[in-house]
Image: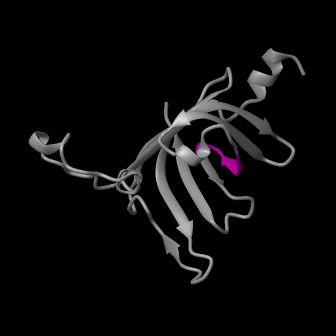
């Protein structure tokens, strides 16, 4: 398939607003919402193959401006409130898998790795997660 046809077939291209970020505890079978029930964020997929994800908690971490550079923060505290990464992506249309080839970002363990995600696209709603949506699910709406 030539590049122009490949780009036309890329239904993920565009900006998607995050409306749900759910993880599932495999021991208890219960859903958890690490960024709150109404997280903020965007996933952007360009036609040329660039991916950029930014996620923020429903209630962002509040630090007074006079102490924002002196209050000790761990990476865990920061990632509990916001995370993001960027890189390139490829799509396996047959198996509905998008692979994020992570080049950088705040999720240090992802840098230099390929993150495979199952996806389901229904109209202007995109679901992304593990292959059976048993560990995690992200729900996004297409932005104009």
At x 12% / y 46%, what residue is drawn? 64
Q: Quadrant of residue 99?
A: top right
At x 62% / y 77%, what residue is drawn? 26
* Nearer the observer, 32 or 104: 104
| Number of dots carrying numbers | 0
Q: Position of residue 140 (x, y in %)?
A: 53, 47
Q: Residue furthest bottom?
A: 28
Q: Is residue 129 left or right of residue 54?
A: right
Q: Position of residue 24 (x, y in %)?
A: 57, 71
Q: Residue furthest left?
A: 66
Q: For residue 122: magenta?
A: yes
Residue 73 visible to the viewer: yes
Q: Residue furthest right?
A: 1
Residue 53 visible to the viewer: no
Query: Which portion, as a residue range, is magenta?
Result: 115-124
Q: For residue 56: magenta?
A: no
Q: Position of residue 3 (x, y in %)?
A: 81, 17
The kind of secondary structure the magenta stretch mainly shows is: strand
């Amino acid at each position: 398939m030539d590049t122009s046809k490949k780009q036309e077939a890329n239904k993920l291209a565009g900006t998607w607003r995050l409306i749900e970020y759910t993880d599932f505890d495999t021991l208890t079978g219960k859903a958890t919402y690490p960024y709150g029930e109404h997280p903020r964020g965007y996933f952007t997929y360009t036609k040329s193959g660039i991916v950029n994800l930014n996620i923020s908690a429903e209630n962002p971490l509040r630090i007074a401006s006079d102490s924002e550079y002196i209050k000790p923060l761990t990476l865990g505290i920061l990632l509990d409130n916001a995370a993001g990464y960027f890189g390139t992506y490829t799509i396996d249309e047959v198996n509905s898998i998008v692979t994020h080839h992570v080049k950088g970002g705040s999720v240090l363990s992802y840098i230099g790795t390929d993150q495979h995600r199952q996806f389901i696209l229904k109209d202007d709603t995109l679901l992304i997660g593990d292959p059976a949506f048993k560990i995690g699910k992200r729900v996004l709406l297409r932005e104009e």
